[in-house]
Image (cartoon, rainbow, N blue to C red):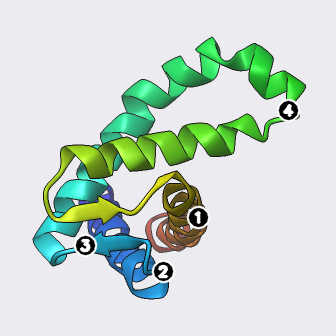
Amino acid sequence: MKLIFKWLLSALALLGVASIYSGVQIQGFGAALLAALVIGLFNMILRPILVLLTLPVTVITLGLFLFVINALLFWFAANLLDGFQVRDFGAALLGSLIYSAFGVVIDSAIERLFFKQ
């Protein structure tokens, strides 16, 4: 239940990113659901591998290269999917930052909702 709720909220977050920033476009809630799923899978599978492979660069840049990794995954997901477009790498960087900010809020809300004591 928690996973489905997070997936739905992540899709809404993508729609929010598209409404806030014109560099990201999504054509409906169905496309947002699919994009949220793909981004989630990329973050679960590809991101740890990329972080490990780019660890020296990440250390040298004091962790700022992680923003580049997030932007690349965001951009790659948009290039794979119809109905989800990102204008360029700069748009992917800003879009992924906004999406990550929404993700922090979503995670906080889910923790409060599902783990009340």
Q: Position of residue 93 (x, y in %)?
A: 57, 56
C-alpha separation, residue under disc 4 versus residue under disc 3: 32 Å
First reached walking from the N terminus: tag 4 or tag 2 = 2
Are dots 1 and 3 in contact, CB under 8 Å? no
The residue that disc 1 covers is 94
Q: Residues within 10 Å of mark 4 (few under 14, many from 20)?
A: few
Residue placed at 38% from the left, 78% from the top?
18
The answer for how far apart the CA atoms under marks 4 and 1 are is: 19 Å
Mark 4, secondary structure of its residue: loop
- Depth order, front residue of 69/79: 79
Picture coordinates of residue 87, whole percent (x, y) = 40, 63
Say what amino acid the circle numbered 3 marks: Ile
Position of 30 with respect to 8 (left or right) is left
Residue pointed to by mark 2:
21
Apparent side of residue 76 relative to residue 53 in the rendered image (left or right): left
The residues bearing labels 2 and 3 have C-alpha atoms spaced at a distance of 11 Å
Circle 4: residue type: Thr
Is there CB contact under 8 Å for labels 2 and 3?
no
- Residue under label 4, please give it: 61
Q: Residue furthest bottom?
A: 19
Q: Quadrant for the N terminus, please.
A: bottom left
Q: Residues within 10 Å of mark 3 (few under 14, many from 20)?
A: many
Residue pointed to by mark 3: 26
Residue 59 at x, y = what percent?
84, 24
The answer to whether mark 1 and mark 2 are in CB contact below 8 A is yes
Q: Are marks 4 and 3 in contact (CB under 8 Å)?
A: no
Q: Amino acid at mark 2?
A: Tyr
**The residue positioned farthest toward the front in the image shown:** 88
Q: CA distance from mark 1 to mark 3?
A: 15 Å
